[in-house]
Image: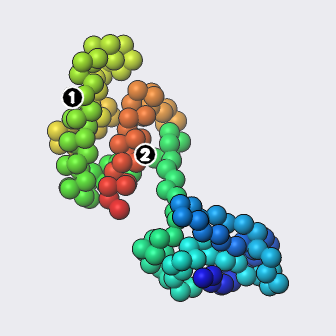
Amino acid sequence: MTSHRQPPSAFRSLSPLTTSTTSKDTMTTPSTQTDPMSYTSRAAQATPAPTASVADLLEAGEPYVLSFGGQATPWRTSLAELLETDREVAADLIALDEEVSRLLAPVATELLTICPRGLRVLDDDGAAVVPAPSHAGQGDEAAVSVPGILLAQHAVLASL
């Protein structure tokens, strides 16, 4: 079963696509259709109506990708906003941060050479253990930003 609909104008110059479904995978290939302005949905077995919302597309099984920013993005702001607005997510993140510290406790002394501030990203109230750098343009060290970014990404997923 295939469904045809008009792609957004920005994509009209792209090759049309056809979907082949196997028992495990869905594969999209160039179409041999005569109408160059149509394409075949990747989710041919459960294609929603053309006016479907993003939620409808996801519920129908449409594949998706989540993309996260890193050190060049305002990860501290995102994390702080999620911690302030969603107490359930905040409690989960605090518990996760505590669990990471517990799991790393056997090597905590060795990790102090890399991260002298300790292992926690958040305190027990959900505030950042290490404040943001005070100088404009100064970024966090990797020992702060990498765990913080990962925690911010986890917070975004948990809030969905």
**Closer to the camera: disc 1 or disc 2?**
1
Q: Determine the secondary structure under disc 1.
A: helix
Q: Is residue 34 above or below residue 71?
A: below
Dot label at residue 44: none
Residue 20 located left or right of residue 85: right
Residue 118 appears in which quarter of the rendering? top left
Q: Determine the secondary structure under disc 2.
A: helix
Residue visible at 27% across and 33% down in the picture: 100
Residue bearing the label numbered 2: 75
Dot label at residue 102: 1
Q: Residues within 10 Å of mark 2 (few under 14, many from 20)?
A: many
Residue 26 appears in which quarter of the rendering? bottom right
Q: Is residue 130 above or below residue 81?
A: above
Residue visible at 25% across and 41% down in the picture: 96
Residue 50 located left or right of residue 34: left
The N terminus, quarter of image: bottom right
